[in-house]
Each structure stands twice: as C-alpha cells, then as structure tokens.
Amino acid sequence: MAKDIEVGGEFQAKDYHDPPPAPLVDPEELTKWSFYRAIIAEFIATLLFLYITVLTVIGYSSQTDTAKGGEQCGGVGILGIAWAFGGMIFILVYCTAGISGGHINPAVTFGLFLARKVSLVRAILYMAAQCLGAICGCGLVKAFQKSYFQQYGGGANKLADGYSTGTGLAAEIIGTFVLVYTVFSATDPKRNARDSHVPVLAPLPIGFAVFMVHLATIPITGTGINPARSFGAAVIYNQDKPWDDQWIFWVGPFIGAAIAAIYHQFILRASAVKALGSFRSSSVI
C-alpha cells in the first residue's frame, strides 16, 4: 500500500502495486459473515433508492397533472428528479461503500466483475439482491400510493414517443458508460495512493454523474442506466410498454459498463501492456 512521504517540501508517493484480481469463484468468502452482510446492504440500499426516487417521479407527475388541478410548472421538475436520483446515489454509496462497495446497480457490479474487482459469485448475488431490493422499494411506493402509482406510470422506464429504439439504446449505453467510468476513476486505488494527501470523496462524483446523465436522458428513456431500477419498476407496474422496452435497459447498461471497464483497465491503466510485458519477460526466461 502506498503512503505519502514529504521530500523537499513536496509530497511523493511510494511505488504502488495493483491488488491481485478477484478469483472467479472464492469458496472462502462464502464462509464469512461480511459477505452476506454486503449482500444485505446492497438489498437495503437499492430498496431505499427506488422508494425515494420513484416517489419523487410520481409526485412530480401528480403535481403537474392539470386535469387533476395541478400546475404545468409545478413540482420539482426534471431538475429535481435528477437531483433525487443523484443525491440518493451519493447518500447510499457513502453509507454502504465500506460494507459492500456501494454498487446499488447491476451494471456497476458487471463492470467491476469484468475488471476482476469482484468474484463471479459475489457479482451474481449482488445483482439478485439489487433486483429484489428494487422490486421491494417499488412495492412500498405502490402500497402507500396505489392509485397514483398506476395512474402516473409507476416510475417505470420506457422509450419516449418520437425516439427510435437505436436512440434509446445509445442513450443507455453512453449514460451507463459515464457512470461506470466515473466509478472506476473515483475508486481507483492507484489514484488514491498517488493523491492520498488530497481528500477524495468517491460518492460525490458518482452521484454527480448520475445527476448529469438524468438531465440528458430523462426525455428519451426516463433514464435507466441501472437494470435493477428499470426491472423493479416494471415488475410492480406490470404494463406492456415497460416490458416491451425492458431489454433496452439491460443490454444498454451492460454494454456501457463493459466499454467503461475495458477503457479504464486496458487503456487508461494500460493493463494490457503490462500483461504483454509480463508475458514477454516470462518467454525470455
């Protein structure tokens, strides 16, 4: 682990070595309470995320429904919805980062798995917990506001009228790339070692990434960039349109996460060059 030392009034970091990649299957982690605690944390965090954000979306829709006495410019607006999503991610990542890593998103988990940051078993169970948490979070919203939930779309993601499937898919790919790229950059242990004298609060840029992507893509798809969020709302709302478009909110985020993982690991971090150099050295020996 790198530590800062002061030389001539300047901070310099000791040599940094990447941690070993996570194994595909780690039987030992299945025996640890910390593993199951992390899964519970992902479930609860995703439940709270969907509960607050879907309530915000439905509240905005009801406040702007002129047929029901609402005002066209009432409610929190798209800006407020984006803040709700970004702010909740900031809060929940901050709360759970030390327990589970604060993924709260199958696309983030998938990207970290591709980068060998988590094992296959952990990735699968995280995704299952996230999807179950999303379903329960939306279920709570429906339980408290059943009439509003069904009347105003249940916060479900769907492709907006006037946009092609390709446009929606591209929006999800690019939006998820921005998010997962930010996750990699904000949590990069090499960067933290190099810049450890500068406080880095990883949840803040991650939350801002979610906020900015929502501003850009709410008019197109309602902004998925999180398969669990889209799946949970679709399950509880259970109407044809969200289910017909559901594949967009899985394929797009997973492609975006994969591109972000490859870009960060093999281009910015030059892992491919290191691996090739190691292979050549072994061949010479």
Image (tube, grey):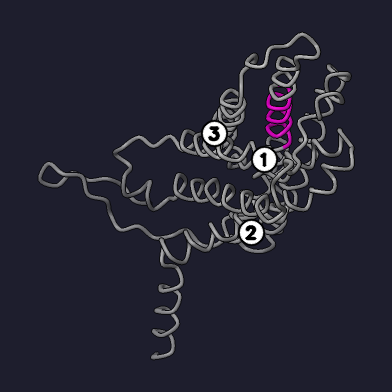
Q: In terms of depth relative to the viewer, which is nearer, 43 or 77?
A: 77
The amino acid sitting under disc 1 is Ala
- Queried whether the magenta region covers residue 51, the answer comes back as yes
Cα distance in 3D space between marks 3 and 1: 25 Å
In the image, is 106 to the left or to the right of 82?
right
Of the residues under marks 2 and 3, which one precedes in the sequence? 3
Please provide the residue range marked out in magenta.
43-55
Cα distance in 3D space between marks 1 and 2: 25 Å
Name which residue lies at 41% across and 67% down.
Answer: 270
**Residue 248 visible:** yes
**Residue 34 visible:** no
- The residue that mark 2 highlights is 255
Of the residues under marks 3 and 1, which one precedes in the sequence? 1
Q: Which mark is residue 211?
A: 3
The amino acid sitting under disc 3 is Phe
Q: Quadrant of residue 281?
A: bottom left
The amino acid sitting under disc 2 is Ile
- The residue that mark 1 highlights is 38
Residue density around tag 1, few if under 14, some if 14–19, many if 20 or more, within 10 Å = many
Cα distance in 3D space between marks 2 and 3: 20 Å
